[in-house]
């Protein structure tokens, strides 16, 4: 394919940014004027989902266009095979300069997965150390982490964090790349911020914008605890809510966490605006496709829950905005998935995958065509639950399956907050069977997943122990020659 027909591609990914808090997407809380401005010229996918509501698996799916069941990446301590082509491999082979700035949370020895280079190292560990089994069933008060501490008012507010320091470096290096982007070939730059992921430590400028903001809080039915599923209870224990759940429901903590999130989402929105300004300054805007998205969402106290890993809407839904030069703005309500981006990028580069991807190219819809409704699947099998668990969205229906436990069935048109479980109701038996069949009569090997999530844990512990003893690491080392920087040469 000729250079003139290959657009540059700029992917901007935030971490844990639920669309329900962004005013540009009809949400409440965060003022996101740069996203709103971008939407005026973009395809806005209003029902986009993560393929897995946790960082590492979601990003493996984003890179490969495959379900996490097919990458074999189940939790934040799992790698995926380097022989699986990613969109970065395909675009490299199509002549692109493929560059990553910021977080992609690759686990294992391969810290590039097809990118030519990274502009900085990752923010989190590259080893297997974030793989954990469930807390000891003999000690139900045991918990792996105290996530609640990140969501209480005393730990939220103005300040600085390593995550902010990381995003500042990521942003600076991204701007620097755009100002010196190659002109003789197309480029693909992925800019991935770790905010608005907690901790909710916020630069003073942004905290002052939101410290008195009136942000709507979730409403809880009186029988909410009785509506929790097995999956919900398992994740509540993993997140520490079995001991401190009442703290999360306290209005003063709900207000603080949502103000902190909104302020950090505003911070990321300003970064998006600066990236767009540099595209304009460099005359690149009309040659560059811009994508804004996130790896997964965040519950922020909805249903009395926090964090991700959960299949409810606030955790599973993501923003997905695609600005393609020459194309009119469109609102696309058909549900789609983050796994659709890899085949979309390959399509934009004029390439074809050598093996089928689970995702599909969104390019026909971006340029004005129609998009068929297909089942959208999100899965989570890792820490805290350790069993096959899936969500299937088809039309207005959403089905939650957790292996060997009671399912959940919701109609989002009538019940957008997912309070009324219709599973087991004879009136909806045909719908429930249809959605269950999508899982049980397809590529998903539930018994294999159920075994693998446990069998690999002791293997990784051996590797972890040896790497600790040898003091070895897989972290990406940035190759910099100081003598060639600035005006020194």
Image: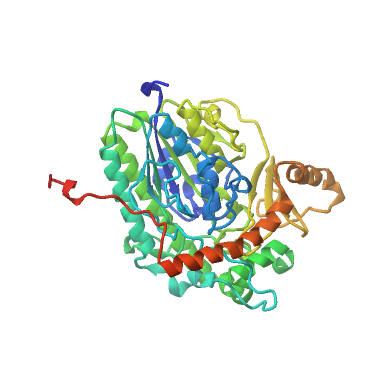
* 177 sits left or right of 470 in the view: left
Q: Residue furthest left?
A: 488
Q: Split into 4 quadrants, where in the image is the N terminus?
A: top left
Of 276 and 125, nearer the camera is 125
Give above or below for 196 relative to 60.
below
Residue 314 at x, y = what percent?
Answer: 58, 54
Q: How is the image coloured?
A: rainbow
The quadrant where residue 459 appears? bottom right
Give above or below for 359 relative to 128.
above
Of 414 and 486, nearer the camera is 486
* 304 sits left or right of 478 in the view: right
Residue 200 at x, y = what percent?
Answer: 43, 64
Residue 359 at x, y = what percent?
Answer: 59, 37
* 127 sits left or right of 167 in the view: right
Count of marks overlaid on the render: 0
Residue 41 is at least partly visible in this image: no
Of 473 and 121, nearer the camera is 473
Residue 91 is at least partly visible in this image: yes
Q: Split into 4 quadrants, where in the image is the C terminus?
A: top left
Residue 410 at x, y = what percent?
Answer: 72, 50
Give above or below for 5 relative to 102.
above
Residue at the spot x=78%, y=53% of the render? 422
Residue at the spot x=63%, y=48% of the render? 69
């Amino acid at each position: 394919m000729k250079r003139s027909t290959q657009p540059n591609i700029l992917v901007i990914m935030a971490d844990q940014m639920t669309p329900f808090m962004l005013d540009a997407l009809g949400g409440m809380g965060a003022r996101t004027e740069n996203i709103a401005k971008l939407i005026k010229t973009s395809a806005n996918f209003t029902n986009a989902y993560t393929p897995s509501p946790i960082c590492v698996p979601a990003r493996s799916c984003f890179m490969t266009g495959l379900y996490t069941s097919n990458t074999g990446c189940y939790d934040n301590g799992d790698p995926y095979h380097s022989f699986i082509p990613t969109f970065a491999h395909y675009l490299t082979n199509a002549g692109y300069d493929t560059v990553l700035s910021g977080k992609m949370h690759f686990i294992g020895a391969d810290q590039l997965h097809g990118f030519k280079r990274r502009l900085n190292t990752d923010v989190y560990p590259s080893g297997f150390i974030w793989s954990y089994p469930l807390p000891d069933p003999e000690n139900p008060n045991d918990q792996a982490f105290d996530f609640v501490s990140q969501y209480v008012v005393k730990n939220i507010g103005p300040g600085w964090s390593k995550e902010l320091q990381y995003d500042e470096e990521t942003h600076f290096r991204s701007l620097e790349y755009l100002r010196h982007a190659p002109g003789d070939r197309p480029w693909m730059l992925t800019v991935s911020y770790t905010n608005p992921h907690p901790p909710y430590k916020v630069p003073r400028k942004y905290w002052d914008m939101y410290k008195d903001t009136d942000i709507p809080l979730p409403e809880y039915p009186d029988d909410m605890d009785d509506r929790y599923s097995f999956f919900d209870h398992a994740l509540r224990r993993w997140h520490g809510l079995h001991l401190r759940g009442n703290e999360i429901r306290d209005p003063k903590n709900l207000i603080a966490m949502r103000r902190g999130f909104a302020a950090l989402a505003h911070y990321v929105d300003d970064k998006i605006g600066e990236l767009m300004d540099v595209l304009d300054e460099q005359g690149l805007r009309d040659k560059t496709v811009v994508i804004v998205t996130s790896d997964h969402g965040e519950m922020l106290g909805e249903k009395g829950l926090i964090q991700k890993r959960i299949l409810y809407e606030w955790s599973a839904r993501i923003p997905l905005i695609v600005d393609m030069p020459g194309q009119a703005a469109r609102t696309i309500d058909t549900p789609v998935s983050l796994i659709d981006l890899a085949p979309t990028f390959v399509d934009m580069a004029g390439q074809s995958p050598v093996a089928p991807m689970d995702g599909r190219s969104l390019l026909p819809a971006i340029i004005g065509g129609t998009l068929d409704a297909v089942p959208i699947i999100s899965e989570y099998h890792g820490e805290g639950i350790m069993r096959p668990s899936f969500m299937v969205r088809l039309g207005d229906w959403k089905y939650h399956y957790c292996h060997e436990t009671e399912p959940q069935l919701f109609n989002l048109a009538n019940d957008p907050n997912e309070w009324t479980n219709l599973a087991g109701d004879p009136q909806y038996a045909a719908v429930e069977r249809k959605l269950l069949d999508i899982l049980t009569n397809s590529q998903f090997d539930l018994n294999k997943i159920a075994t693998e999530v446990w069998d690999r844990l002791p293997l990784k512990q051996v590797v972890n122990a040896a790497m600790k003893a040898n003091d070895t690491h897989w972290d990406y080392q940035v190759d910099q020659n100081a003598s060639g920087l600035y005006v020194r040469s």
